[in-house]
Image: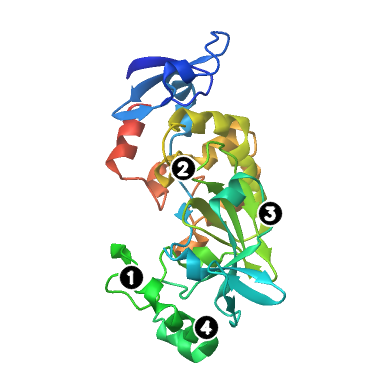
């Protein structure tokens, strides 16, 4: 285990030049950037104290829906009509419209959606031609705005059905979610439910895990917002990064270990075995004594390196 580089006081942005750092007091606890195995962590000393939490991600963390066409795919509702970002009144069926929370909403605790997003598929393989049959007004709208949608440059839209979106699956439409903004420097998690009888959809700058019930979502959210989990998370997060919170970081949080630290194992037994509900996988044998019985062992080289350095 190696530690190196600078001592950082407080939570200042590492990219700031010294003259712009507002407080150079040495009263706060310092954080030492260091290497844990072959991975850089933001606070090596705290990481070593909490590294038992660096383990298995029982849930699969996901990003929200990506469409790269906010001007025509996102709407606000005014006087019973949907208004897109081009300030056009849009007469659409509600079949493919879902309430939307963006990264700024989640980061600032605004959990009541005031936007909607057009989601043309439930899974990446879905043929969008079905929209024409099921919701002709929506199809007419899409074709009228094909100039914006057909010119999306990302490679993810190539060789896929016209008007496709990305980052969709059963998890997108789960009734409950636990979400965090990937762009903001606070590490707060929030519970996301339904709105107007429909599941709330998140944009692609948010990370979330799907849950089957409100009780499950609130339990998981409490684990993630606990002091010990927040301390561990901050050992991994570099606050000056463009996107401080990533799926790779979140996948390192072992919620079983967090629950054990919080003496909430009994509750964890109710939910963690079914963490793969929205992934079409069998229940997980989370609390088996022998790790070989787990159905989702982590075999990635980085994870193996982390285990070897415990």
How far is disc 2 from disc 3 in space, using C-alphas? 21 Å
Question: Along the line of sight, which residue is nearer the eye, 184 or 50?
Answer: 184
* Residue at which label 3 appears: 215
How many residues crowd around disc 2 within 10 Å: few (fewer than 14), some, or many (20 or more)?
many
Question: Along the line of sight, which residue is nearer the eye, 19 or 97?
Answer: 19
Which quadrant: the N terminus?
top left
Mark in front: 4 vs 2: 4
Q: Quadrant of residue 226?
A: top right
Q: Is residue 309 above or below residue 97?
A: above
- Residue located 56% across and 55% down the image: 102
Q: Is residue 240 left or right of residue 255?
A: left
How far is disc 4 from disc 2 in space, using C-alphas? 36 Å
Mark in front: 1 vs 3: 1
**Is the Cβ of the residue at disc 4 closer than 8 Å to that at disc 1?**
no
**Is the Cβ of the residue at disc 4 closer than 8 Å to that at disc 2?**
no
Q: What secondary structure is marked by label 3?
A: helix
**Is the Cβ of the residue at disc 3 closer than 8 Å to that at disc 4?**
no
* Residue at which label 2 appears: 250
Colour option used: rainbow
Q: Indicate which disc residue 138 carries.
A: 4
How far is disc 1 from disc 2 in space, using C-alphas? 33 Å
How far is disc 4 from disc 1 in space, using C-alphas? 19 Å
Mark in front: 4 vs 1: 1
* Residue at which label 1 appears: 151
Q: Indicate which disc residue 64 carries.
A: none
In the rendered image, is residue 269 in sight?
no
Q: Is residue 90 above or below residue 50?
A: below
Which quadrant: the C terminus?
top left
Mark 4 or mark 1: name the one nearer the start of the chain: 4
């Amino acid at each position: 285990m190696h530690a190196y580089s600078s001592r950082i006081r407080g939570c200042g942005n590492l990219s700031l030049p010294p003259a712009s750092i507002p407080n150079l007091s040495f009263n706060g606890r310092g954080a030492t950037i260091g290497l844990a195995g072959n991975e850089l962590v933001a606070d090596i000393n705290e990481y070593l104290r909490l590294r038992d939490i660096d383990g298995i991600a029982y849930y699969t963390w996901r990003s929200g829906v990506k469409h790269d066409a906010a001007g025509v795919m996102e709407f606000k509702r005014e006087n019973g009509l949907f208004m897109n970002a081009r300030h056009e009144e849009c007469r659409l069926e509600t079949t493919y419209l879902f309430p939307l929370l963006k990264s700024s909403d989640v980061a600032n605790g605004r959990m009541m959606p005031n936007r909607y997003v057009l989601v043309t598929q439930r899974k990446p393989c879905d043929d969008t031609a079905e929209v024409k049959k099921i919701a002709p007004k929506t199809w007419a709208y899409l074709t009228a705005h094909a100039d914006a949608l057909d010119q999306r440059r990302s490679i993810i839209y190539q060789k896929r059905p016209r008007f496709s979106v990305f980052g969709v699956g059963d998890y997108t439409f789960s009734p409950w979610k636990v979400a965090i903004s990937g762009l903001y420097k606070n590490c707060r998690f929030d519970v996301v439910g339904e709105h107007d009888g429909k599941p709330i959809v998140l944009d692609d700058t948010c990370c979330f895990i799907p849950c089957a019930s409100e009780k499950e979502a609130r339990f998981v959210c409490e684990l993630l917002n606990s002091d010990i989990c927040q301390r561990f998370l901050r050992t991994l997060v570099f606050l000056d990064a463009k996107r401080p919170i990533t799926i790779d970081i979140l996948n390192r949080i072992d919620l079983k270990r967090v629950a054990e630290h919080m003496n909430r194992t009994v509750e964890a037994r109710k939910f963690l075995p079914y963490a793969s509900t929205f992934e079409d996988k069998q229940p997980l044998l989370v609390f088996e004594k022998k790790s070989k019985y787990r159905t989702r062992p982590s075999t990635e080289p980085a994870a193996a390196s982390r285990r070897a350095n415990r």
